[in-house]
Amino acid sequence: MDPEDSPGEERTSPSVRSAQGLLERVAQQALDEDYAEKAIRRQNADPEDGARPRRGKRSWAVGVAFFAFALLVATASMQRYQQADEIAKSREQLVTQVKSAKSRLDTNLATIQTLSQENEDLQSALLADDSDAQELLRDTENLKAAAGYAPVRGPGVKVVIDNAPHATEDAEKVLDRDLQRTANGLFEAGAEAISINGQRLGSLTSIRTAGHAIGVNYRPLQRPYVFSAIGDPRKLSVRFSQTEGGLYMQAVKKRYGLRFDVSAADDLEVPAAPMHKLLFARAPGTKPNGGGSQ
């Protein structure tokens, strides 16, 4: 048997094996030269031009960018916190100023009422012996009471209005128009004097929402809103229920659950309305009050 035909060797001809050997040597030489060239380039390469240094440079740039971004976020958060703190401080200062101004206003109003009462007492004392003057004073007091500028007392009805229990929506809360319509209904029913939480309703009284509160005579009121209306208790209650304001509040109570209670009272006190200086209006035959023209 020819050794070349032994089962342990590949069944190829010598020419083929020679050609394969030549190809293997050529390929190996080419690979060796290629690896050698790459090794030389790595040794002689400038760190700024090599692939690995470039990768490091990119990583460093990404790190710097990330740090800059984090710094910007931290700075913005700190500025926002500082602004929120400044807003809170400004709000506290404003609340303090409002409370201080309200306290001064209360003090001034109390002083005005005291001086007005002292003035009336002096007038009565000076004119005590003059019957005509006394009659004139009585007429003046009646006119002031009718206009709302003198305190009065007598029987009447009490009306209590408040938000619905567990109110969450505006429709379930008392609105300024609820108080306006109630006041109009009571006057229409024959009330001679009306106050809301101690604030007398006069010819220059306004009832309107100011912020989160309803103001009467420019004074914010707290719930519940209690009307004191002087008049015939029985007639006043019946007539009020038939007025547009009374019917409106009954419908609001039924639909939204607001508190709306009407009860008779034997003795009610209604204070005087705050005095307002008239700048343009004047009685016929009197001199102007100095309002001037705009």
Image (cartoon, rainbow, N blue to C red):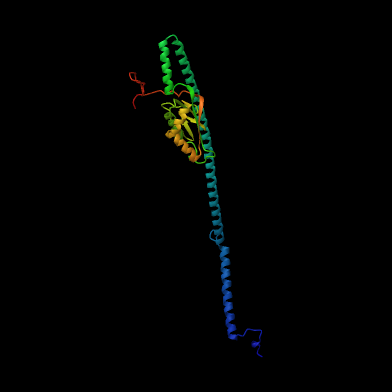
Q: Which percent across, then down, holds residue 170?
A: 48, 40
Which quarter of the figure is the C terminus placed in?
top left
Q: Which percent across, then down, holds residue 118?
A: 48, 16
Res. 270 visible in picture: no
In this rendering, is residue 173 above or below 204?
below
Q: Residue at x 58, y 80 (%)?
A: 22
- In the image as oriented, which residue stretches furthest toward the top? 129
In this rendering, is residue 186 above or below 10?
above
Q: Which percent across, then down, holds residue 192?
A: 44, 25
User: Which of these two is toward me, 38 or 217?
Assistant: 217
User: Which of these two is toward me, 270 or 35?
Assistant: 270
Task: Locate residue 277 relative to residue 85 in the image: left or right.
Answer: left
Number of residue marks? 0
Q: Which percent across, then down, holds residue 242?
A: 44, 33
Q: Quadrant of residue 11?
A: bottom right
Q: Quadrant of residue 182?
A: top left
Task: Locate residue 38 relative to residue 145 in the image: left or right.
Answer: right
Task: Locate residue 255 relative to residue 9 in the image: left or right.
Answer: left
In this rendering, is residue 132 above or below 3?
above
User: Which of these two is toward me, 154 or 104?
Assistant: 154
User: Which of these two is toward me, 156 or 277?
Assistant: 156
In this rendering, is residue 136 above or below 268?
above
Res. 84 visible in picture: yes
Q: Residue at x 56, y 68 (%)?
A: 37
- In the image as oriented, which residue stretches furthest toward the bottom? 1
Which quarter of the figure is the N terminus placed in?
bottom right
